[in-house]
Image (cartoon, grey):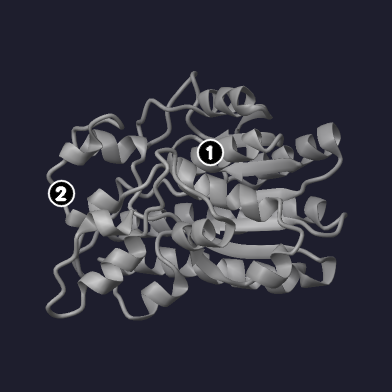
Amino acid sequence: MIAVVAGATRGTGRGIAVALGAAGATVYCTGRSTRDGRSEMNRPETIEETAELVTAAGGTGIAVRTDHLDPAQVEALAERVDREQGRLDVLVNDVWGGDPLWEWETPVWKHDMDKGFRLLRLAVDTHIITSRHLLPLMIRNEGGLVVEVTDGTWSFHQSRYRDNVYFDLAKVSVNRLAFAWSHELRPYGGTAMAVTPGFLRSEAMLDGFGVTEDNWREAKVDPAWLVSETPAYVGRGVAAVAADPDRQRRWSGRSVSSEELAEAYGLTDVDGSRPRVWSFIEEAREPGKDLDPADYR
């Protein structure tokens, strides 16, 4: 299996890359944060670290610094994959980088417009540019897989406004891109789907709450945090889809959560639990409900 995980530096992208590595894949781990310099996210994680984790898991990790807003760099990435492998089986679009840019619960007339448009470019344009240059390599062979990573399923967004117009539009758009790719790949036997993790214990979230993976339950935050998951959980789900010969019929065009994939394939998180945070959030909205987060793990 030959895969490109665009945005593999940390979080969900890293979790998916490592899970694909555990399945024996060769994974091109792309992003802007390297040991030679950080992106505007200013985080310490690097694509080289992710590539090393992929190799340690049993695959072959290859780090390629790529700014996915630059078509020339993405085209060069596609040419390299073609030259070295001759094909592409899996593309994961997980580029984000918008964390420093959005302003919580801020109406459009107060939100910084330049930051908002930068967020949309990072969240949406990058995915389109990446697909434009890598899908021609994928469709040479029948049965490729594209995974669009987002925050919240299509059905979840239908009845909710996500904090501000830029964030809301970004997350809905990525779901729609998966639907679009499913139609464009259908003549080639390809599958495209959108996948969302739950409340993610990413490196940045753990740092932000002042905890580690060892004591994460001590964070004083929303009760949904007690139903959170590691990046490995969604990674295992994506790896299971990649190995499923029936994936087009089961998943193409759909927008699903990590918990749905775990249920479908009998998967668990690294601690043996099966977090169901989206179910918790949905049911917590019902009047009179007093939920125990422990019942959703």
Question: Which residue sits at x=77%, y=71%?
Answer: 186
Label number found at residue 45: none
Q: Position of residue 262 (x, y in %)?
A: 51, 56
Label 2, secondary structure: give it: loop
Residue 66, visible in the rendered structure: no
User: Looking at numbered disc 2 in the image, what kind of residue is underneath it?
Assistant: Val
Q: Position of residue 194 (x, y in %)?
A: 55, 63
Q: Name the residue under label 1.
A: 8
Q: Mark 2 points at which residue?
A: 221
User: Looking at numbered disc 1 in the image, what kind of residue is underneath it?
Assistant: Ala
Q: Mark 1 packing: few (<14 Cα in 10 Å), some, or many (20+)?
A: many
Nearest to N terminus: mark 1 or mark 2? 1
Q: Where is residue 286 in the image (x, y as percent from the top left)?
A: 20, 79
Please determine whether, in this image, residue 80 is positioned above or below residue 118.
above
Question: Which residue sits at x=71%, y=74%?
Answer: 183
Please determine whether, in this image, residue 284 is positioned above or below residue 261.
below
Q: Position of residue 156 (x, y in %)?
A: 38, 73
Relative to 212, 177 lies left or right? right
Label 1, secondary structure: give it: loop
Which numbered disc, 1 or 2, marks the residue closer to the eye? 2
Question: Which residue sits at x=31%, y=37%?
Answer: 204
Foreground: 183 or 121? 183
Q: Mark 2 packing: few (<14 Cα in 10 Å), some, or many (20+)?
A: few
Which residue is the extreme one toward the top?
A: 36
Please determine whether, in this image, residue 139 is positioned above or below residue 228.
below
Residue 243, visible in the rendered structure: yes
